[in-house]
Amino acid sequence: MRSRMTTVATSWCGQSVERVEDGPLLTGRGRFIDDLGVRPGTLHAAILRSPHPHAKIRAINAMAARTAPGVAAVITGAEVTAVSGSLVVGVKAPIECWPIAVERARYVGEPVAVVLAGNRYLAEDALELIEVDYEPQPAIIDPLAALDPKQLPLHEGLGSNVASERSFRYGDPERAFAQAAHRVSVTIRYPRNSCTPIETYGLVAEYDANEDAYDVLANFMGPFSLHAVMARALKVPGNRLRLRTPPDSGGSFGVKQGLFPYIVLMGVAARVAGRPVKWIEDRLEHLVASVSATNRVTTLEAAVDAHGRVNALAWDQVEDVGAHTRAPEPATLYRMHGNLTGAYDIRHVLVRNRVVLTNKTPTGLNRGFGGPQMYYALERLMQRVAVELKLDPVDVIRKNLVPSGAFPYRTATGATLDSGDYGKAIEIALAQGDFAALRERQKTARVQGRIYGIGVTAAVEPSVSNMGYITTVLTPDERRKAGPKNGAQATATVSLDPLGGVSVQVASVPQGQGHRTVLAQIVADALGLKPSDIRVVAELDTAKDAWSIASGNYSSRFAAAVGGAAHLAAEKIKAKLARAAASQLNVAVQDIEFAGGRARARGNPDNAIAFSRLAAAGHWSPGLVAEQNQALRETVFWTPPELTPPTEKDEINSSLCHGFIFDFCGVEIDRMTGAVRIDKYVTMHDCGRVLHPGMVEGQITGGFAQAIGAALYEEYAYSSDGAFLSGTFADYLLPTTTEVPTPLILHIETPSPYTPLGAKGVGEGNCMSTPVCLANAVADALGLASIDLPMTPVKLAAHIHAAEKSARSRA
Amino acid sequence: MKPVRFDYIRAGTLAEVHAALTTGGEDARIIAGGQSLVPMLSMRMARPTVLIDIMHLPELANIEVRHNAIRVGAAVRQAALLGWPELAERQPLLARALPWVGHAQTRSRGTVCGSIAHADPSAEIPLALLVLKGAVELSSQRNRRRVAAEEFFTGLMSTARKDDELIEAIEIPCSTAGHGYAFNEFARRHGDFAIVACAAIARKDGVRLAIGGVADCPTARDFPNIDGDALDDALDDFAADLEARDDLHATADYRRALVRRLGRATIEEARRCRA
């Protein structure tokens, strides 16, 4: 592996260097949480979960379970409320959010009791001995039904099931609608789904009674703003909740954010039992109750002129966050707030946002986070504009795009689109993806009587979330009282050891993405070294490492924010070394350059000193280093100044960077079965500067696969009475390799002016663009005005088989 | 997802299997490839107190041709049958059906007879056995008997096997010259249990069609040589008689539509193969 890195390169960034992560992962030597040993005496937890979507808990009889073989303790709501507090929720509403049912269960799968035993088998045996006296209550499943003020509130203090309602107005939308030649609208019901990581949640929790401190090892992914939520719930200062992450984590896609209530729950369990507690979530638990993306009912209307130019949008979004507004919800709804006009130059926007509570699993982070829901409405709408005005859908997109040369562009709702050339990206994609040939292919297929459609989608992909966007849910007045929240602090530490080895530590908490490899590239570039000279540690320990509330792995922030912070830390070290080198080489500091493992005089490469010698000096003879701080260790906390809090007018720059995506596809629908076959898929990306092309391709391909799942296969389905129907992977269908075609991936690069390396996020875009692109193609194929996900064969066949006559089977 | 406590017997002889089944009764289960049973154990949907492993009995691991039938022993894995060089020649329908069974990974563990014992209504192997009029060889301490496939599958995951009986082998008739065989199915994803599976045999004087995935167990029907609307009507009747149900993946209506369409396509394919 190392030998391949010996060639001299001008820049390691931009190359697909071999991933340092892959050796262990591909040879079964990963160190995931369940691979790590535990201390003797550690108890294993199993969780009894509510079979009811909504029930009062009259009594829990755990007598038999407590005396079952190997059982050390049984924890219920009573024990949890005795030593901890409710998890803080993100809206100003009297909603309690406990990690276990307290007197009432509000969703199928909600924890009701925890058994702690010598091993998981015994713990599960004892679960069967717990008797719970439930009094079932009517369940609210449909988010629109939750709007009904006559429905009983799920949280007594709330008075209704609307946890939050806000309206926004930007520009002069009423006038734009009054003057519109056409009004086009869509109503969509975006389903619940999830990205289901291969490794489920896991943790080992310990409580030290002497210090009143918790120590938890968990495959949590951040955001570490939730550390504050957990510490407050556990009623300890932040420094008494030490949270550590294992070296490897097997995927997350946002989902492992939802682990945090279990950290509190098992922390309490460890405290009550007086012994460490290990819990590994199993797949059944994961599907029923880990976390889900939100389902949403959106009505979106456009004011359109005679030529297809959209002048105003009116959004009505009903967001279903499940049984609690678990932090950071309703962030899914507000993450895209600055981007409600997508890739388009639309100056007038009305928004009505309602967040409702239903008897479903609480929602949380999930790849795309609000983008899939929002773009499904916006891009279905743009397709309907084309259909209703009899225009070419590509022309409708072109006509409405934020124009080239308009960057940075401030959207009506407050986002600053940092850079891009949307028109150019589209024309390149149409040419290189041979859109003209696809149109011909469709024509031929239709002549042959086949059902064939084409979809197009344009999307702006936000990355590096502003930690303040969620406060847009508060009124300006409430925000003033709460104090400003904003920014996206990233941290990185670069240090040199006495032999000149470079170590990097970040708070990015990767789950297989390859952060360690990319950070080695970045730091190697800064210091004139090879990536193999750099060792990166990416596991996090909140007691020892630099971190902040924005730490973690979400909102596609790694390349732009964390990579940038590592670059800045390396540059600080480099500046220090350059001063030392300058004095030793007798040249001016600005004439020192770092290359090939040496610091040398520019233009006179023989006047040089080995990097390792420079590094060593700071350790062996710090007195000779003419610096106030001789330490060769630099930690950078970086936050972009562009991420300001919401304005008085509720404008919010919800994300720092905005990539661009243009997708098109051709699909054929099988006449016999209604199954969708993706014939061709082209996805054009502008994610700024590409640091590692192979990983970017991996991100796009993985997001594309998950988007195919969302589009065609996956749904966390509930019956109308609240039963959960997708409890196994035989019910919740993930696309496998045979269901995922290879997309044509194209790129242009317009670097972000706001990030140290010019990089933007790229991990979530296809989860936003691909479901609706496929839906637009299916709608085109079947001539449908409305189609909701997932587009299952049975759903599509209803449009094909309808004409069939069958006297007996229809009786 | 941890099973209830059970005892495990690694049987060394057939007599040992029979004795354990007699002793264990309904609380004993045979474990072969474990591809269906182990998840059921983990989910505590199956709670046997004793598992009897038959995979170490060489006498159960044979594929042989006897009396113009392929006899597949209880320990023969699906992959082994699929890889048997004579399969396509001896019984093309089986050769076509087996690649639809799960995935290469599950076929490398799962057994042919295990699929018969499990009797999932959507499974391909029971469907093939039924359409081909195969039989199941059962043995116990008491006796040994042979049950025709038509009598063996009695309902949703239920069979004519008694608690003390071992499915020792199945017998699948070899192909007949001049018959055409076809197999098709539709599932949500490659390797999933079928929403509708169709197996057809075209003879000179008619056609036999069996459907899986719709009724509680695979169901076969013989049709005379009809075509056009008459065949459509006959398939429509068949579809209606199967008493399809709605589930998460498909409605009853959709399943009936597929019986008519995929059933007809399969019959036509079998006829073409005959020609």
Image: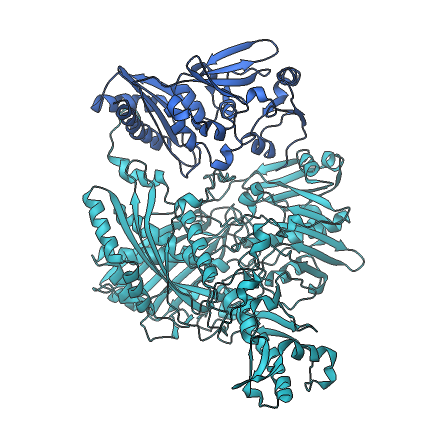
Chain colours: A cyan, B blue
Is B3 positioned to the left or the right of A161 in the image?
Answer: right
Residue situated furthest right in the rendering: A210
Most extreme residue toward the front is A606
Work out which residue is located at the far top of the displayed protein and give it. B143
The location of residue B122, given as percent across then percent down, is 43, 28
Where the N terminus of chain B falls, by quadrant?
A: top right
Q: Residue at x 45, y 44 (%)?
A: A736
Of A552 and A586, which appears nearest the observer? A586
From this viewpoint, is residue B212 visible?
no
Give the image location of residue A632, x and y in percent: 67, 77
Residue closest to the eye, A547 or A294: A547
The quadrant of the picture occupied by the C terminus of chain B is: top left
Q: Quadrant of residue A20?
A: bottom right
Tell me, yes or no, if residue B34 can be seen here: yes
In the picture, residue B201 is in which quadrant? top left
From the viewer's perspective, tell me whether residue B174 is left or right of residue A201: left
Using the image, determine if residue B127 lies above or below residue A104: above
Q: Is residue A400 above or below residue A29?
A: below
Q: Position of residue A722 (x, y in %)?
A: 49, 40
The image shows residue A691 at horizontal and vertical percentages of 48, 67
* Residue closest to the eye, A65 or A734: A734
